[in-house]
Image (tube, grey):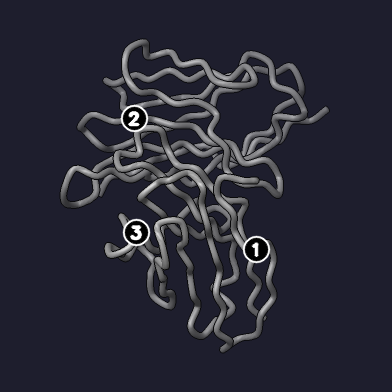
Amino acid sequence: AQSVSQHNHHVILSEAASLELGCNYSYGGTVNLFWYVQYPGQHLQLLLKYFSGDPLVKGIKGFEAEFIKSKFSFNLRKPSVQWSDTAEYFCAVNVPFSSGSARQLTFGSGTQLTVLP
Amino acid sequence: DADVTQTPRNRITKTGKRIMLECSQTKGHDRMYWYRQDPGLGLRLIYYSFDVKDINKGEISDGYSVSRQAQAKFSLSLESAIPNQTALYFCATSERTAVYGYTFGSGTRLTVV
């Protein structure tokens, strides 16, 4: 079965530090890739997405992610984090259901980011 | 108004009780999903629906049932709640290919005591 791995379960950084969160997936076909953010007590919101083309994708709030097809990776980065970036971050990949052409999102287990003021 | 609305936002119920969580959407999406979120486990798919007449089990459907009353409404029921069903439940919607990702509701925090 297809899977998405987020190796960092909890990351703690000080404000202004640089951030990189890892995401690897196992599906070998064409994929669309997503990063979602969940602020404390809130629902998941789309941070950025990759469809095709330029593998470096820019999202909201200064986040970006790089798709490296050969490594099956889609790592999230931010040059300088802020206290308000404290949240849980989920990587997701849309992969086919077992039959047909419809697709579903498969989520990683999430990375909790804590930014210390 | 939110694109995907879940009710209730919080609920405490007793073991053995039946409870229904409701989800409605204004996105016009055909696909609707129910997930549960547990710390360290991410999001796990309970049920999904391609349209009103097409409902499918996800990876953790035992103990749950669903009803797609209309294109815009998708309810999740716990027939006899148990404590390990304590979790945060999310409804989500998408168009057919999910190429734009999912739109999530605000979630229902369910506690079974």
- Position in image of residue B60 (x %, y %): 39, 66
The amino acid sitting under disc 3 is Ser
Q: Residue furthest top?
A: A54
Give me the chain letter of mark 1: B
- Position in image of residue B50 (x %, y %): 31, 55
Which mark is nearer the camera, 3 or 2?
3
- Density class for disc 3 (Cα within 10 Å; few <14, some 14-19, many ≥20) is many
The amino acid sitting under disc 2 is Asn
Give me the chain letter of mark 3: B
* Closer to us: B57 or B37: B57
SS at mark 3? strand
Choose top left, top right, bottom left or bottom right for residue A88. Answer: top right
SS at mark 2? strand
Q: How many angstroms separate mark 3 from mark 1 (CA)?
A: 22 Å
The amino acid sitting under disc 1 is Arg
User: Which residue is labeled 2 in the image?
Assistant: A32
User: Which residue is labeled 1 in the image?
Assistant: B109
Residue B49: numbered disc? 3
A88 is higher (above) or lower (below) than A21: below
